Image (cartoon, grey):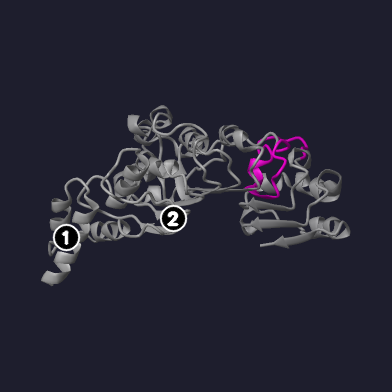
Amino acid sequence: SASDKKIIKEGLKVLEIPGWKAWASACNDSNAEQELLYATILMHTPNIVSLDIDDGFVRYKTPKWLDLIRWAVSGSPFGHIHQFSHLRSIRVDVLNLKPRHLCPLFKLQSLRKLKLIGLMEPGTAKVGKADYLRRLVPAASCPIDDFSLQESFINCEVLGVLLGFIRALERFEYQHADDRWLLRGDISEVYWSGSIEWQTTYGDPTTMLNYPTLMAALECHHHSLESLSIFEETEEPDIQEAPGFIESLRRFEKLTYLNVPLGALVNLERKTPQTLVEKLPRSLKMLGIFIRGYATEYRCMPAVEHMAAHCRDFLPFIEHVRIGAIDDSGSGYTYDWKRLLVPLSRLGVNLVVD
């Protein structure tokens, strides 16, 4: 109604933002972007503590909600817009946004928890490369302590830059998955055709997750990290294991929760016996290991059995071990889980096999 339009116009006028008349006209247009209206609401919610965003297509380059945060952290006045000083949690289900667009979130000094779903950045374009992103946010300046990346596909050097923005990370989750990436119409045909164009244009998905590079990025948080979860869910055909593995987590003295693929802890290509328990931190209370059902992984189960037999010597606080295993029948290899259950039960450690 006319009175509604007047209320919106007067509300924006009071805020004295640059171009408030054009903003009001856009809001009052019969075809107004819904995202624009939500952003206008955000201008009047200074006490907001949590924000849940479903990213989508808009007619302008950057979503207005993100512009508001960018202006709030810029240090330059933007009318009388509040500074989101109570906003502690943001969740974004990403469609088109890239790390460079989301950098203002890492400058928000009230933010403690950030969850990004579906973030994709192969780091092949200049504006997506690590060196470019490193200039956008000062290192170790972000107060986020809980950072989660789900269903995401990110170049490890780029991921390292994002982790470097954070001052003292306590909880980190990364689900390395290429399903959203491969469903994009502009690249799926190239990938599934097996064309060499995939590697030259979009990067090689088989080398995107690199455990040594990732752990080097997390090293600056060894004094604060309490929970670490890494998942690897990549599609066929011919997807290989992530290159490298974690050499040691002993410096992470506060780490109590660890959930990783078996291939992150042992060298799946090695034919000789190996162990993993000595690389785990003594502070650990819960250990989760995911086994994808390949014969190469089950061949490394003696390392897990050694951990079960000697965990009290290396992990005095361990309480739970959880094994997530894909059905192993397809690999032609079957495993007797009592080989873990018996020694762990004897030591008073709870075992769950999913």
Q: Quadrant of residue 1?
A: bottom left
Q: Which residue is mark 1?
A: 9
Q: Position of residue 343 (x, y in %)?
A: 86, 55
**Residue at the farthest top position:** 131
Residue 207, label in figure? none
Residue 96 seen anywhere in this rendered image of the structure: no
Q: CA distance from mark 1 to mark 2?
A: 30 Å
Depth order, front residue of 342/238: 342
230 drawn magenta: no
Quarter the C terminus occupies: bottom right
254 drawn magenta: yes
Amino acid type of the residue that numbered disc 1 sits on in the rendered structure: Lys
At a point 83% along the width and 48% down the height, the residue shown is 316
Mark 2 surroundings: few (<14), some (14-19) or many (≥20) residues within 10 A: some
Q: Which residue is mark 2?
A: 91
At a point 17% along the width and 51% down the height, the residue shown is 20
Span highlighted in magenta in the image: 249-275
